[in-house]
Amino acid sequence: MWLFKSSIGKKLIMSISGVFLILFLLFHMSMNVVAVFSEEAYNMVCSFLGVNWYALAATLVLAAGFVIHVLYSIMLTLQNRKARGKAYAVSVRPGHVEWSSQNMFVLGLIVVCFLVLHLSHFWYKMMFAELLGLHEVTLGTNIVSPHEGAAFIRYYFSNPLVVVLYLVWYGALWFHLTHGFWSAIQTIGWSNNVWMGRWRVISNVLATVICLCFAFVTLFFYLKSVC
């Protein structure tokens, strides 16, 4: 089937899964911002999104979308390397080609590596702990409920090294999104000569809002811990 065998089909699958992941980032960003204004409300959201059928279903769908996105990006990268041969290794970047465009795979790897760190900090001790039937988990020297999401944010974002690592992650994510979003829209076919420039602007705005909000939450809780 062309959708799975052709380059266009593979890129379409990667683009659709990428847009899906961006929608999740918007949700996750909005959820995190809640913690700045009310930790109690954030804990209520964490409790609502605890272990239940719809949360588990959403997690499985999200994981599937992420795996598909990563696998197809790897396949397309290897396919492009093979097709371009030695020309792929040329270090001079054409003036019309964005830096992020030529480094999407590397940026994606950085995002994936830091995602593992993020999951170990939060998902592993929250939803996964609930799946194991744990009602309490160790967080530093404290014992907290997996539903106390604000406690996890306060604990991890009080560590300056963790904060720096997360800020690096947001930077890589910004570059990945600024190119990835408009490129996905173009591949899906929701673009033309008039809208192409607009989608590029929307991509920059969207990526900036997402990453700045994540960074704001991170820095807010770090500054709160030292004040």
Image (cartoon, rainbow, N blue to C red):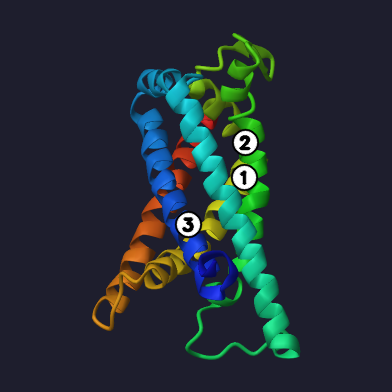
| Residue type at the position of mark 2 | Leu
Q: Does 34 sit left or right of 6 as displayed?
A: left
190 vs 165, left or right, is left
**Other residues around mark 3 within 10 Å, as few (<14) / some (14–19) / many (≥20):** many
State the image coordinates of residue 219 (x, y, percent, origin top left).
49, 41
Q: Does residue 167 appear in the picture of this structure?
A: no
The relative height of residue 169 versus residue 36 in the rendered view (above or below) is below
Identify residue for label 2: 119
Element at badge 3?
Answer: helix
In the rendered view, tell whether residue 107 sits above or below residue 99: above
Quarter assignment of residue 107: bottom right
Q: Which mark is residue 10?
A: none
Report the residue at 66% width, 58% height from top: 109
Disc with the residue nearer the chain's start (2 vs 3): 3
Measured in 3D between alpha carbons, the distance from the residue under mark 2 to the one under mark 3, in whole angstroms, is: 19 Å
Q: Residue at x 56, y 44 (%)?
A: 64
Q: From the viewer's perspective, is residue 40 above or below residue 155?
A: above
**Residue occupied by mark 1:** 115
Residue at the far front: name it. Answer: 1
Mark 3: amino acid: Gly
Residue pictured at 44% horizontal, 46% vertical: 25
Counting from the top left corner in percent of width and height, residue 80 is at: 65, 78
* Number of the label disc, if any, that sits on residue 18: 3
Could you give the CA–CA distance between mark 3 and mark 1, rounded to whole angstroms?
15 Å
In the picture, which quadrant includes the N terminus?
A: bottom right
Question: Is residue 109 depicted above or below 28 in this figure?
Answer: below
Q: Is residue 87 left or right of residue 151?
A: right
- Residue at (38% x, 65% y) in the render: 204
